[in-house]
Amino acid sequence: MIRVTAAVIAEGGRVFIARRKPTARLGGKWEFPGGKIEPGETPEACLRRELREEFDIEATIGETLGRHVHPYDFGAVELIVFRVNAFRGSIRLNDHQEARWVTAENLEGFDFAPADRPFVAMIQAAEIKL
């Protein structure tokens, strides 16, 4: 089981999403930003580290919004999603092809990684508030 974290960063009724580089695993897919939990690392610490490394932001991690296990051909992924309550810094793309702030209504126009799709649906159904 590969354990990964992801962030729901909401601002002004929009959520931050990022597109993986074409050369990455699941290349070209959109995702809620985050990454793989390292040995000995808490999920919250992982998410803070990943957001710093990938986007140059310092995030305040909030509540857990849910967990989802998805079987990929390379192994099962457990995705743990957190709300980011605030962040400092200007977002810079260090590891993604592009990023956008989008409304819940516009999320369906993006090709998300399968593990992220349940959280897209939760945002669209207003189970996760932006």
Image (spheres, helix red, strand yellow):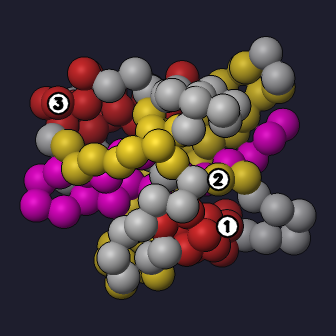
The x, y position of residue 9, in whole percent, is: 33, 60
Q: Mark 1 touching mark 2, by CB under 8 A?
A: yes
The x, y position of residue 62, in whole percent, is: 43, 71
In the picture provided, is 11 more to the left or to the right than 9?
A: left
Q: In the rendered image, which residue does mark 2 sit on? A: 35
Q: Is residue 8 magenta?
A: yes
- The answer to which image quadrant residue 43 occupies is bottom right
Q: Which mark is residue 46?
A: 1
The numbered mark, 2 or 3, whose residue comes first in the sequence reads: 2
**Separation of residues labelled 1 and 2 (CA atoms):** 7 Å
Q: Which amino acid type is shown beneath numbered disc 2?
A: Gly
The numbered mark, 1 or 3, whose residue comes first in the sequence reads: 1
Q: Which amino acid type is shown beneath numbered disc 1?
A: Cys
Which sits in the foreground, 72 or 118?
Answer: 72
- The answer to which image quadrant residue 37 occupies is bottom right
Magenta residues (range): 1-18
Residue drawn at (17%, 51%) of the image: 14
Q: Which mark is residue 106?
A: 3
> Can you name the residue that lies furthest to the top here?
73
Label 1 Cα neighbours within 10 Å, binned few <14 / some 14-19 / many ≥20: many
Q: Is residue 95 magenta?
A: no
Residue drawn at (23%, 50%) of the image: 101
Q: Main secondary structure of the magenta part?
A: strand
The x, y position of residue 83, in whole percent, is: 39, 61
